[in-house]
Amino acid sequence: MPVLYTNEYPHTLPHVNETYIRRTAEILLDLLGRTAAELSILLVDDKRMSELNSAWRQKDGSTNVLAFSLTEGEDLGMAGNLLGDIVISIETAVREAAREKISLHQRLDFLLVHGFLHLIGYDHEKSRADSQIMVKREKEILQQLKIKRSEPMIRLAVNVDHVATLREARGIKEPDPVLAAGICELAGAEGIVVHLREDRRHIQDRDVRLLRQSVKTKLNLEMGANREIIKFALDIKPDMVTLVPEKRKELTTEGGLNVTGQKKKLRDVIRQMNDAGIPVSLFIDPDPRQIAASRSIGATYVEIHTGRYSDASGEEEREHEFALISAAAENAYETGLRVNAGHGLNYFNTTRVASLATIEELSIGHAIMTRAIFVGLDQAVREMLALMI
Ligand code: PXP
């Protein structure tokens, strides 16, 4: 649960957009390299802010934002993944926005960035030099935030496993999935996915090690919760891992993880990964029980299995499966999870899934590689991206 949002502001006006604030906080976690961390945001009025200001900082009156870090001081070690709390007084933010002639949400952006920087150790009250450093960083991050917001929400992560499948069919060095990954990124993919299987049928350790160095966007390592691969992942430190069920005899991942049935084991893997700063996604069927269980054991993301939607044999079945995906994405997002989706998506069925506002990223492999044989990898990626707008 990366962002815990609590609105204790006791009035309905002004309207504060929860999705906007959660999205801002998620972008900040990503921008500052803390994707695996959790952040709590509390909105209050001036009265409550004055109480907090007096209790914790021995200061009179309200203020705009307070940040309580859980990664420093006596609480260190008690925090788990929680970076800390950012408390914002909406009443003060409204007054400041009016004074600066900007919208409330623009002002909230600034207050969130300010609070976030305090949480990770910046302190403008220490000295003039510290204040200058913090102001400069605030400006940089606000600029990056603007750019990130203007990008389309949905991203494409390309799975390059099947480039390795072709290589392994000959047992030689070509084609190289590392080179393929670079081409995908140049064509506009914002992530590279590889599944390091226990049987090493396609992707090899060498591929992941090289990709770790060469991928410029985000390396997502798909893996089963198996001890040897966990050790490897902790050593390589991909940008994220996606846990999938893995059976030796399957041709591809067949279904979502049974999270409800193995909470303890998965919680333990998530904890180990998070301790190493690696966020974890759980590949699950669009099932509310699996979503609730994923959240309860601390996953940052879920990847919703789109396989049954993709394989549906008729319109009625496809509609039914799409409705499940749509409801699951909404449910997971509302629960506080970040949401990806994938499996079996192709040039005919992706646009609809990409239109779901709560999904951040699609993971697509086989269809892109199949098309790449005929039109080239660069074009195959670009064509898929064009369908996701
Ligand atoms: N997501 C997961 C968890 C997968 O296991 C796979 C297949 O490796 C994909 C997405 C991509 O599926 P496809 O190759 O059918 O696009």
Image (spheres, grey):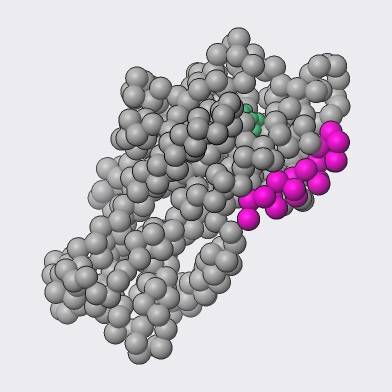
Residue 88 falls in image quadrant: bottom left
Residue 104 lies, with reference to residue 259, above or below; the image says below
Q: Tell me: 200 left or right of 169.
A: left
Q: Nearer the viewer, residue 311 or 187?
A: 311
Instruction: Indicate the position of residue 349 as horizontal and vertical percent values.
Output: 62, 40
> Residue 207: horizontal and vertical position, in percent?
72, 30
Report the span colored magenta.
Answer: 372-389
Say left or right for 171 vs 13.
right
Q: Residue at x 86, y 27 (%)?
A: 174
Look at the image and say whether residue 386 sits in the magenta stretch. yes
Residue drawn at x 81%, y 46% is 379
The quarter of the picture showing ligand 1? top right
| Residue placed most toward the observer, 288 or 270 | 288
- Residue 263 is covered by the magenta coloring: no
> Farthest residue toward the top?
249
Residue 365 horizontal/vertical position (percent): 68, 34
- In the figure, 136 relative to 99: above or below? above
**Residue 124 lies in quadrant:** bottom left
Query: Would residue 104 be visible to someone looking at this image?
Result: yes
Task: Look at the image and tell me in which quarter the N terminus lies.
Answer: top left
| Spot occupied by residue 256 in the image (x, y as percentages of width and height) | 47, 25
Which residue does the image show at 47% across and 59% down from the upper left? 28
Which quadrant, please, contains the C terminus?
Answer: bottom right
Magenta span: predominant SS is: helix
